Amino acid sequence: TYITDYNDIEYNSKIDKIKYMEINNINITNFFIKSIIINQKYDFCIIVGGINTRCNIKFPKCLINKNTFNFDIYDNIIIKIIEEILPYANNIFICCNNYYKDYFIEIQKNNKYNNIKFLYYNSINNLNNFPNGNGETIYQLLHNEILTNKIFILWGDIIISNNKIFEEMYNLQYDNDFLIPVIYDKNPYAYLIIDINNNIEYIEYYKNKPIDFGYHDQCIFLCTTNILKDNIKLILNYNNESNFLDIIKNLKTVKYFITDYPIKTFNTINELKLI
């Protein structure tokens, strides 16, 4: 579709696959473009396959009520995430483990949306009833589900302050296979290693190499599905934890941007209390 206020290109309207749309003001142009983007929704994949040992609780931390800090079927972190992503999502895959399956089944029973699917995984070697790291969770997702050509991958322990972060990502999805919203943060848990050409080389971790400030990912990623599928096997450790973000080392077009809508995340109950 050629959007303009003047039909000034040469084409054959009968045989060329070009449609001329005359628009005389920028508001209508923006509305038209936005309607196209909204109608091209991608699948969202919420990764909750871990066993969150640092929280010292007996249930998944994504199912905690952030006010009472107890397990809650109706008011918890993952339900809040779902509410924020629904306007932007095609299908929503909640990637769980069998270790906590009984808890997730309670949430699944109360699900009222037909585009949400709960998935339950063991480790790839079947020695554990939970995947060995988020890399194994996403590997099984990619090889067992039919997904849109791009997918959002997000961790299940985040508090989304403003879901316009997804509009940012939809708008910046082009010319890259892996898009990362970031903030410049003090003592970041994880941070980007960037070369002199502003290309991302890999993700480093504060526990391995402490820094004062760095570009901290926001636990949300927009990825080209077939590129992930072709490369994710390269990062599997099978008997040890596989970290999904290690895949960045094998990708050519990884981009980042500083978001206007940062998220919050937590690893412990005390961290959650501070949000």
Image (cartoon, rainbow, N blue to C red):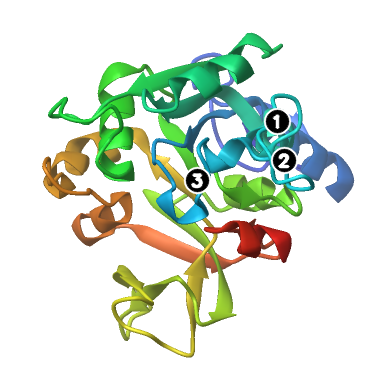
Could you tell me the amino acid type at mark 1?
Asp
Residue 93: in sight, yes or no?
A: yes
The C terminus, quarter of image:
bottom right
Name the secondary structure under disc 2.
Answer: loop
* Residue at image mark 1: 72
Contact between marks 2 and 3 (CB within 8 A): the answer is: no
Residue 210 has which mark? none
* Residue at image mark 3: 155
Residue at left offset 19%, top offset 56%: 250
Could you tell me the amino acid type at mark 3?
Trp
Identify whether 50 is placed above or below 128: below
Q: Earlier in the sequence, mark 2 or mark 3?
A: 2
Contact between marks 1 and 2 (CB within 8 A): the answer is: yes
* Residue at image mark 2: 65
Measured in 3D between alpha carbons, the distance from the residue under mark 3 to the one under mark 1, in whole angstroms, is 19 Å
Q: Earlier in the sequence, mark 3 or mark 1?
A: 1
Q: Residue 28: where, in percent of width, then height?
A: 86, 39
Identify whether 109 is placed above or below 151: above
**Dot 3: within a 10 Å radius of its alpha carbon, few (fewer than 14), some, or many (20 or more) residues?**
many
Could you tell me the amino acid type at mark 2?
Asn
